[in-house]
Image (tube, rainbow, N blue to C red):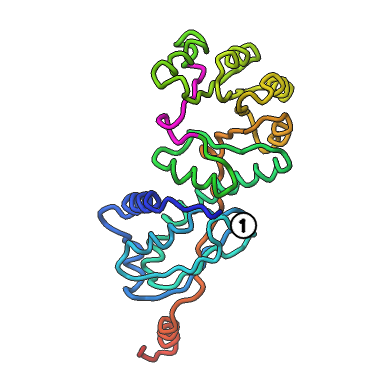
Amino acid sequence: MKLAPPLAELARIVDLALAEDLGAGGDITTDSVIPAGMPIEAEIRSREAGRIAGIDCIAIAFSRFVEPASVAVVAADGCDVAAGGTVARIAGSARTVLTAERTVLNILGRLCGIATATAAAVRLTAGHRVAIKDTRKTTPGLRSLEKYAVAVGGGVNHRFGLYDAVLIKDNHIGIAGSITAAVRGIRARLGPTTLVQVEVESIAELEEAMRCNVSAVLLDNMSPDMLRRAVRLVNGRCHTEASGGITLANVREIAATGVDAISLGWLTHSAEALDLGLDIARKAAHAEASTKSRASGSPPD
């Protein structure tokens, strides 16, 4: 199923990024060097293999300028590209393309990097019935876009914020006094049928959470052996999610413990951006002819 990108959020971020880059003076380099109306053709290429997410930012960015530039998408969101592969072909105003270039590559590279990292984790856990989940460790202001990129990579979105799901964490428990007290507080305020997930760090805490009939447990920083023990204890009575200290190096081992999900905060807080670049394919014929005329001493047409 094709995911619908959050276009309104993408447009908002593009506008913020362009405003940050252009300031009050605009692109003083491009406007000084490149004549108005000069057309070019260019390609956005990936310098490394990866998963594409956020491709719509190119057209959105170009639409913010008076001089037109068009984009032909070669690799849509969800596509995998090889190193050197073309992501999009561009034609139109040189000024528009050069001025929007860095904003486009920053946003696209960030989202592609998250999708690529997620896809890698999903591939490594293939064969196990486990979901790769994100967390709330997102870049402020970019959450919906970063979670979209996780979904494009084949991952599953955890809660989007504090408002849409209950997760009782260690500090809640410490202040409330116990897991039992924290769960009682949730059900007293939100109702007895509210789905409750509790973070636990030991088998004793897991046993207390199970006595509270929680719907999910977050098994935090547990070794593979402890995770297997936890899964046996739960025995399908609630959703199990492993978290903490999980990397691409050990994610398959964690998946093999039988947990239902693995949450990876680094997917959004420290995934490396995909290395993308914009390469000029050729300038317009009249620009080339002008250059040749100047070289021969003849005046341009």
**Looking at the image, residue 131 lies above or below residue 290:** above
Compared to 9, does 286 lie above or below?
Answer: below
From the viewer's side, name the closer residue of 165 and 68: 165
What's the residue type where badge 1 is placed? Asp
Q: Is residue 165 magenta?
A: yes
Question: Residue under circle 1?
Answer: 80
Question: Residue at position x 44%, y 89% from top?
Answer: 296
User: On the rendered structure, is 74 left or right of 97?
Assistant: right
Q: Nearer the viewer, residue 7 or 179?
A: 179
Identify the magenta region. 159-171
Q: Is residue 50 magenta?
A: no
Crowding at label 1, few (<14), some or many (≥20) Cα neighbours within 10 Å? Answer: many
Residue under the point 45% across and 36% down: 160
Residue 77 is situated, as x and y percent measured from the top left of the image, at 53, 56
- The secondary structure type at the circle numbered 1 is strand
**Image quadrant in which the C terminus is located:** bottom left
